[in-house]
Amino acid sequence: MGLTRQYLRYEPAALFGLVASARSSVAFVALRGERGRYVAVPGCEHVFVWDTRKGEKVLILKGLKQEVSCLCPSPDGLHLAVGYEDGSIRIFNLLSGEMNITFNGHRAAVTALQYDHLGGRLVSGSKDTEVIVWDVINESGLYRLRGHKDAVTQVLFLKEKNLLVTSGKDTLVKWWDLDTQHCFKTLVGHRTEVWGMALLSKEKRLITGSADSELRVWDITYIQEVKDPDEPESKKSKGPSPGTEENTEEDETLELDEHPEERIVKCSKVGSIVREGRDRVVTLATDRMGKFLACHGTDAVLEVFAVLSEEEVQKKLEKKIKKAKKKAKQKSEEVPERSVELSLQEEIQRVTNVKASSKIKSFDLILSPKGELKIVLLLQNNIIESYNLDLSAQVPQAVRASKITIGGHRSDVRTLAFSSDNIAILSAAAESVKIWNRSTLQCIRTMDCEYALCSLFVPGDRQVIIGTKTGKLQLYDLASGSLIETLNAHDGAVWSIALSPDQRGFVTGGADKCVKFWEFELVKDESSIQKRLSMKHVRILQLDEDVLCVRYSPNQKLLAVSLLDCTVKIFYVDTLKFFLSLYGHKLPVLCMDICYDGTLIATGSADRNVKIWGLDFGDCHRSLFAHDDSVMYLQFVPKSHLFFTAGKDSKIKQWDADKFEHIQTLEGHHQEVWCLALSPSGDYVVSASHDKSLRLWERTREPLILEEEREMQREAEYEESVAKEEQPVVPGETQGETGLAGKKTIETIKAAERIMEAIELYREEMAKLKEHNAICKAAGKEVPFPVNPILRAYGNITPSAYVLEVFKKVKSSELEESLLVLPFSYVPDLLRLFNEYIHLGSDVELLCRALLFLLKIHFGQITGNHMLVTVIEDLKKTTISRVSEARDVLGFNMAGLQFLKREIEAKDEVTFFADATERFEEKRRKRKKKEKMVLAVL
């Protein structure tokens, strides 16, 4: 076997230049005992927690590969639920920053998350049109609710009743009864998508935001509250509870009623509040107390409304009645009290508008104990702004408290460059140039510029040159962070800039069909005695088409120029005579590079191909299909024939130009990659994307073997295909409104395989034991039994105990799905083992959950198997007795805890009153002392 070429792996080292991604929501989180100071924002696949007061990143909740699509903090403030683009949900502990729970149920991005008021349940809505309710404490899915025909936009729990309200892009608002898990009411009063929804006035009012300027307000009335008091009890009931099978005549008549859904709740439209914005509602939300409501559209204005409480409404109404009576008295008329009503605009009052510095993507509100409303805004241009609203003022005005901007650019980075010492990184966008320290990832310089398209570090790394969209060259001094000189270089955009190998000058190519040659020179500065660096135009090469990219050969003999006519022309540098034309691309060549020894040139085009050419004769060595979209940037690794390409398909790929092989793919960016830069040493790659992030990749010492890489790629493709397969169906169940919460993933298949392997080991060991006992009986003496190495590794446990260990290791959220893919041939053994475990009283809750699920999905086969009749009978007895024992223990513990709670409360009250008495005595002593002093003075 011949020697294989060894490559070194590049690994992701850091993500920087990103304040917040605009794809998800922003949320206030309680951290270090403070509310209203820390905010959680999405940062591509991670979640960043920022301190708005100091403008510092205090915590990073690390994700995997998928982008964050939704955030929701828990009511206790200790956890944060994060929804991702692939439909998974992870719950993080904010104290430790670690991930506690993972839920997999949705097939598309999670669009809405909401905890119930105790934090025990979490509901999620997704682009796959389904709603899933999760049990956070048991770490499992409860049920899936189907009904929407398009993406779900908002989900809300009703605290008082076990109800759920969901809205979707299908123009519907649906009401779900969680006791019976069905949709009992659908609001159809919207003509377009329902984008947002909020509950007001102690959940007696619902407000919805749509694609127009109206916020529709609905009154919620619970039917039990408005029923006739003389009505018999049988008709008051909502119908049979989920556990009962009885159906009385009264219930049936209610079901046949004209509006059967109005047995639970009645929802009637009371009016609309008109927003100032004319476009669709993007976010509509209230603060935690429900006192303030805010919404925004696709513009930069947040509209804030105050919602009056019942007491305030009553006071206002009394005042209005008094006024009306006074008016009527003057006209000698009588005013009935019922005719005086408050308008909707008086109950929900406009407070103020908050004007942000850019388009708002999301917001959150919190009412501080001081009575100040704190607002945090996540903006489209990589900024977090926080505002304070003083509500005690006559005309409340929002005052900007902080603005987090330093950590990134306002627009997409279009050019990157490394300094010659590998330490500094330059990034330039439409509004600024930033210099970053590679090791600390801190921004050390920010300089305003025009729309930058290309850049380079001047030899010596003290100055940088930027080529702009307007055709200018801007020279900056890094020490002072100031613009030294601006030259009008081209009549169109400066698309490319390349430093000459002798480092005495550079060449630029522009949209004005010119290639211009420049030299560095020192000129006298008018303001100081010292000379400063300048740029001098020395030569020009006029061409027939726009120039897209220019590159020098390392020996400075040749110049490669990419043109808009899809060709690359090679010229001699000294005479500017034409040498070669490289043609073959179907679309313009956007990027190219020449390797260190000047033998090869690689060109990347908008036709998604990379072509490798010889520079001696201009022959095409190989054409590679590189990306699924345009190839945006290409650069050779210094002192090698390996090169990197960046594409609009969000991937960065490494290639071997000698063997024409794809080496590895660097996945991390979520949108188009615009540019990349390699450090002069070749140890670092930095890339910039449309997702506003800059990513640093580091070359490790780990060798990369291509066969292994291909195998891993095939495995990943298989796992992806398994997840996309049809979900297993529960026998006897129809595809109705409800379903199982989980979904089939590679993890659930692996868990089922582990259970199967454990049962097979149990069978083998039992057979061996029988054989061993027979041998011992025949020999008439004890023969040592060989212990299985797996069981020895677990501490010489029995085979049945090993099956239980494996079973306990299956994640709670994956248990049902793992049992669903388990073949029935393993179920009889599992039932016998369950009987044994429950009899011993170990893990009763887990085993009962698994047992009931297995009975549900394999009911026909279990009841039809005579061998299992005795097992099921035994299970019935042991399960009932063990569950009642567990319930008794739980009841006893609850009673004990309540007793302790009462004891502590009683002690606290005593100490509270004792403290109050002491304080009162202290005040009295001070007052007497003061009086004595006054008398003494008199």
Image (spheres, grey):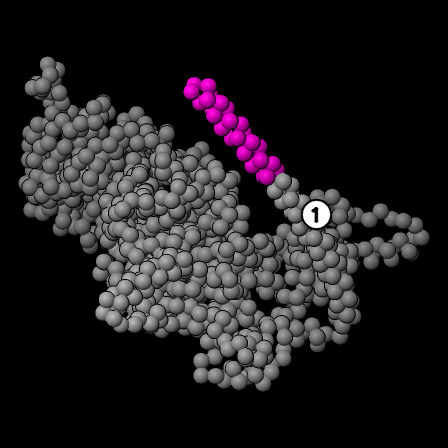
Does 930 appear in magenta? yes
Image position of 130 with respect to 448: above or below:
below
Question: Is residue 130 rendered to the left or right of residue 841?
Answer: left
* Residue 763 visible in the picture: no
Quadrant in the picture for residue 46: top left
Q: Indicate the quadrant where residue 437 lies.
A: top left
Quarter of the figure with the C terminus:
top left
> Residue visible at 36% across and 49% down?
364
Q: Residue at x 66, y 50 (%)?
A: 898
In this rendered view, identify the residue nearer to me: 72 or 127: 72
Q: Measuring 36% from the left and 38% from the top, which residue is drawn there?
A: 52
Residue furthest to the top = 529
Point out the residue furthest to the right here: 780
Q: On the image, numbered disc 1 is attached to which residue?
A: 790
View extreme (front): residue:
938
Please identify the dominant SS of the magenta region. Answer: helix
Give the camera-side residue of 730 and 571: 730
Write the residue at 78% across / 59% down: 839
User: What's the magenta region?
Assistant: 911-938
The amino acid pointed to by label 1 is Ile
Looking at the image, residue 607 lies above or below residue 180: above
Where is residue 358? Give x, y as percent: 24, 47
Q: Quadrant of residue 426?
A: top left
Question: For this rendering, which residue is in front, 749 or 330?
Answer: 330
Residue 787: x, y in percent? 77, 47
The residue tagged with tag 1: helix, strand or loop?
Answer: helix
In the rendered image, residue 765, in percent from the top left (x then y), is placed at 76, 55
- Answer few, some or many: residues within 10 Å of disc 1's Cα (few below 14, many 20 plus, some between 14 and 19): few
Res. 821 in view: yes
